[in-house]
């Protein structure tokens, strides 16, 4: 096996392969090394990680980076820059989880950095920012997600459009490029509301001054009187000025709030960028469902509906709350990860009634055909019954 195989970093992998080859020569049953294979699988992608907070860095008045290591001090599973973990929390008896992009470098295996920005009315972000301190323990999933650089198809000219905490996966991608000394161009176009909202401001500026292959362009949409940088929102004209005319071979990544993502993608398409050259990662909760076409005109977000969980009970909620959130608030757990309609882990069976699915609910055809819904982006528009 090639010495450059990424699996060689997993403790015991090389030895297990050598033993397998020796067993193959004698025809010995491979069951003898089954435990070693399972151990390797668990190192690469365990179902759950036991983590503890080892450091907290205040990035801005509304943002902190929480650094997590394993409870036993061991190495963490490898990940690709741009991936996230789903962090489980218990807040006053409510068990829930939120996905956070890993903002540290993939070359760093002893900790994961998660950058958390306060969301307006955010149930979990407020808890993580206000109540968590070093030493606390958490459970999480292994790294997951497809918002990653693919060297076979994405080329070497990368542009990242980030809004708010959407800079977290951008930082991970950037650090990997610089630390590996990869021959890629990386242009980060970073938009925030206020000057003191810019996460990693000093670090990004220092890296842009140090490395010729990294270009940083920041925008503030609500600048103060003494602000000297670029202000205003992105537009097709501004993007054209920043990117030039040679756009065909650039690869674009977009991460930020849903409205930012949608607008940025539309502007790039207006410049002639093909959709296959644009990668989008949802960052934050879905936008208000009644802002989408197809929402029942007579229905208010505050209208009350009844959700019945087959064989387990019922509860009241509102039409404007994602089904997954209301299930968790009332003590019903459902496996979940992305909370943005992408991964399908949170799917439940809709037995009766109707739900509204916004555009970001990318239901597979088979799920639609068999009555499955993705609870993180499903909004009950009448009384419903579901099966978990």
Image (cartoon, grey):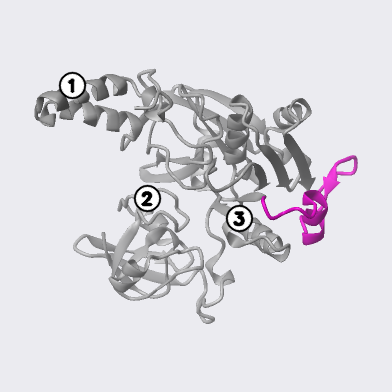
Q: Residues within 10 Å of mark 3 (few under 14, many from 20)?
A: some
Q: CA distance from mark 3 to mark 2?
A: 28 Å
Most foreground residue, 160 or 99 = 160
Q: CA distance from mark 3 to mark 1?
A: 46 Å
Relative horizontal placement of residue 85, taking residue 367 as reference (left or right): right
Give the quarter of the image for residue 103: top right
Relative horizontal placement of residue 215, taking residue 118 as reference (left or right): right
Residue 322 image position (x, y, % from top left): 44, 61
SS under mark 3: helix
Quadrant location of the C terminus?
Answer: bottom left
The residue wearing badge 3 is 277
Quadrant location of the N terminus?
Answer: top left
The residue wearing badge 2 is 336
Residue situated furthest bottom in the rendering: 298
Magenta region, residue range: 222-249
Residue 229 included in the magenta stretch of the image: yes
Q: Earlier in the sequence, mark 3 or mark 1?
A: 1
Most foreground residue, 138 or 84 = 84
């Amino acid at each position: 096996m090639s010495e450059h195989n990424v699996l060689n970093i997993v403790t015991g992998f090389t030895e297990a392969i050598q033993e397998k080859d020796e067993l193959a020569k004698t025809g010995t049953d491979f069951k003898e090394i089954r435990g070693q294979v399972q151990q390797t699988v668990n190192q690469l992608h365990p179902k759950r990680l036991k983590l503890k907070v080892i450091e907290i860095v205040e990035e801005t008045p509304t943002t902190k980076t929480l650094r997590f290591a394993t409870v036993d001090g061991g190495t963490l599973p490898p990940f690709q820059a741009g991936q996230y973990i789903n962090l489980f929390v218990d807040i006053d008896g409510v068990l829930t989880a939120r996905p956070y992009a890993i903002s540290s470098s993939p070359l760093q295996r002893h900790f994961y950095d998660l950058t958390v920005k306060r969301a307006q009315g955010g149930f979990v972000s407020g808890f993580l920012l206000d109540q968590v301190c070093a030493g606390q323990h958490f459970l999480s999933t292994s790294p997951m997600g497809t918002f990653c650089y693919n060297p076979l198809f994405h080329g070497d000219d990368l542009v990242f459009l980030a809004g708010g905490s959407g800079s977290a996966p951008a930082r991970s991608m950037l650090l990997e490029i610089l630390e590996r000394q990869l021959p890629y161009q990386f242009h980060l176009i970073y938009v925030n509301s206020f000057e003191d909202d810019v996460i990693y401001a000093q670090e990004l500026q220092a890296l842009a001054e140090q490395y010729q292959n990294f270009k940083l362009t920041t925008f503030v949409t609500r600048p103060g009187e003494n602000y000297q940088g670029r202000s205003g929102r992105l537009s097709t004209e501004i993007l054209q000025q920043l990117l030039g005319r040679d756009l065909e071979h650039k690869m674009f990544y977009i991460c930020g709030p849903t409205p930012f993502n949608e607008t940025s993608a539309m502007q790039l398409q207006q410049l002639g960028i093909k959709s296959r050259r644009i990668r989008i990662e949802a960052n934050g909760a879905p936008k208000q469902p009644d802002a989408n076409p197809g929402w029942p005109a007579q229905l208010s977000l505050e209208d009350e509906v009844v959700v019945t969980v087959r064989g387990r009970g019922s509860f009241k909620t509102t039409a404007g709350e994602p089904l997954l959130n209301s299930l968790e608030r009332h003590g019903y757990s459902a496996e979940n990860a992305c909370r943005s309609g992408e991964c399908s882990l949170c799917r439940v069976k809709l037995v009766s009634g109707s739900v509204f699915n916004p555009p970001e609910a990318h239901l597979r055809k088979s799920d639609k055909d068999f009555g499955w819904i993705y609870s993180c982006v499903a909004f009950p528009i009448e009384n419903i019954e579901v099966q978990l």
